[in-house]
Structure formats: C-alpha cells, structure tokens
Amino acid sequence: MNASTDRIQRRILLKAPRAKVWRALADAESFGQWFGVKLQGQRFAPGEPAQGYITYPGYEHLLMRVVVQAMEPERRFSFHWHPYAVDPDHDYSHEPPTLVEFALEDADGGTWLTVTESGFDQVPAERREEAFRMNSGGWDEQVGNIARYVE
C-alpha cells in the first residue's frame, strides 16, 4: 500500500467549538446542508446506510450512498462509500469502498478537523486514478464548505 496513492487527507482549523462541528458531521440533515446532498429525514447510526441525491449543480441525478462505520461523539465520525461513483449505468456495489473519517481535536480558538479518505489502492485500476483525483479536489472544496457552515 502506498500512502500517497491510497489516501487523501485534509486538515483545517475551524473557528467553532467541537460540539458545533460534531453536529455538522453527525446530524445527517446538517451534513447534507454543507456537503451538498439531500438527507432530510435520515439519521446516521453505526452500521446503518444513509443515502440522498446530490444537490451540486450538474450532479443532481446522482444518489450518494454511505454506510456509517463509527460515531464517537465529538471525536470521530466515519463511513464507507464508493468514491466518485458518478456513472448512473455502472453498478459499484461489487467494488471495495473507501473509508472516509472525520477526526476532531481541540485547538486554540476552535477545532482541528482532519478528513481522511483511504482505500483507493483497492478501487478497480480502470477508475482508481480518476476517483482519487476527483475526490482530492472534492475534499479541498468540502473542507471550505464545512468551515463556512460552522463559522
């Protein structure tokens, strides 16, 4: 496993208390607001799936599916999903998913948020590079989105 191709990691200092950042992550409807996915009426729970349509312009036809893995209040939230699963005619269910983890730590004046998506080395070779590249850019955008949402 090569860490440079297997994982994407972003770290940002959020000028918000840990409890507020946690709610933005762990509450499905709040998560959907900043992430750009309709999760109304859903809740996140370990071992349970959640899904909703993307609200980002041009991607509204895409259904985002996650399976929540861990919820450690104000510390860690994680889920599995299929990265850059954008072809509506492709069945991604047979592919190994990646793991997305959000880790929270106290910081002076706010909360450190570290987002890590790992498992790209298991994504089928024919779509691995594009999935990594697109999700890398996606996480750049998403850390900005959560910052605007909680600050």
Image (tube, rainbow, N blue to C red):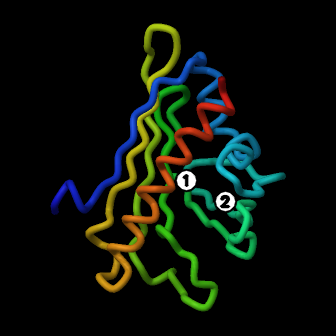
Residue 20 picture quarter? top right
Q: Do callouts 1 and 2 mark residues in contact (Cβ within 8 Å)?
A: yes
Which residue is painted at 44% across and 24% down in the image? 112
Q: Residue 68 — which label?
A: 1
Q: Residues within 10 Å of mark 2 (few under 14, many from 20)?
A: some
Q: Quadrant of residue 103?
A: top left
Residue found farthest to the left: 1
Q: Amino acid at mark 1?
A: Val
Q: Residue at x 51, y 80 (%)?
A: 93
Q: Amino acid at mark 2?
A: Ala
- Left or right for 27, reference 69: right
Q: Secondary structure at mark 1?
A: strand
Q: Nearer the viewer, residue 33 or 96?
A: 33
Position of the N terminus, as image quadrant, is bottom left
Q: Is residue 3 found left or right of 137 in the rendered image?
A: left
Image height check: is 87 above or below 63? below
Which secondary structure lies at badge 2? strand
Look at mark 2 in the image and give the residue it sits on: 50
